Image: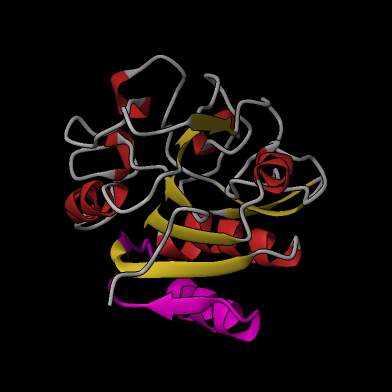
Amino acid sequence: MTVDFSNDLLVLIDIQNDFCPGGALAVADGDAVVPVANRLMDRFDHVVLTQDWHPAGHASFASSHEDRNPYDLIKADYGDQTLWPDHCVQGTEGAAFHRDLRTTPAEMVIRKGFRPSLDSYSAFFENDQKTPTGLGGYCTERGFGHIVMLGLATDFCVAWSALDARRLGFDVTVVLEGCRAIDLDGSLDQAIDDMHDAGISLIQTL
């Protein structure tokens, strides 16, 4: 049976060099999502890419905090914040999309995390859960009711994007073969549980 995705949106989350092997915040086997993304783009008429896009010295970088290390947890004005290695700094090779990712089919690129004091995992909201990226309005105006997602990393940017999309009223599917996780202190299991509880469809392949 052929499935019609002509009115659905494929969102590819942060498939960037710094999240792939050899990158500053490499996700194990992260580059394995690239062929999945490329294959699925052939099946969708509408594609959006997201791109982590931090200024140097971003508040989420451990290097911006004295006596702090990557993966420490601190309190930010908007809640808990994991500190990361410097990554996806604007204009660097690490912030670029993986060289094998097809980007031509994308109708839009959403850059996130560019506010110096505010991190952004989700494609829809900054981490304060109030500041929108504009993707929600774009989806509404374009009439997309169903959003299919994959990318990096399952337990952070993919999960936060999926949960926010669901909160905005969209039907959401996450393609797990096109995701890889950081899995920090059980974060993957928690993310999977949260997505299940939110009514997000988790499928292995599409």
- Residue 32, image quadrant: bottom left
Q: Position of residue 100 (x, y in %)?
A: 16, 35
Quadrant placement of the C terminus: bottom left
Read off the magenta span.
179-206
Name the spot of residue 117 as percent of width and height, x first.
71, 31
Asked if residue 99 is positioned above or below residue 19 in the image, the reply reads above
On the rendered structure, is 206 left or right of 52? left
Q: Nearer the viewer, residue 150 or 75?
A: 150
- Please give left or right for residue 151 compared with residue 99 in the image: right
Assess whether residue 201 is covered by the magenta stretch.
yes
Give the residue at x 66% y 64%: 170
Residue 17 visible to an observer of this rendering: yes
The residue lying at 56 percent from left, 22 percent from top is 57
Residue at the image position 52 percent from the left and 19 percent from the top: 56
Residue 54: x, y in percent? 53, 26
- Front-lying residue, 200 or 64: 200
Dividing the picture into quadrants, the one containing residue 168 is bottom right
Q: Is residue 13 magenta?
A: no
Q: Is residue 55 left or right of residue 74?
A: left
Residue drawn where x is 34% and y is 42% of the image: 15
Vertically, is 62 above or below 36? above
- State how many labels appear: 0
In this image, 145 relative to 28: left or right? Answer: right
Residue 152 appears in view: no
Q: Nearer the viewer, residue 166 or 39?
A: 39
Which quadrant, please, contains the N terminus?
bottom left
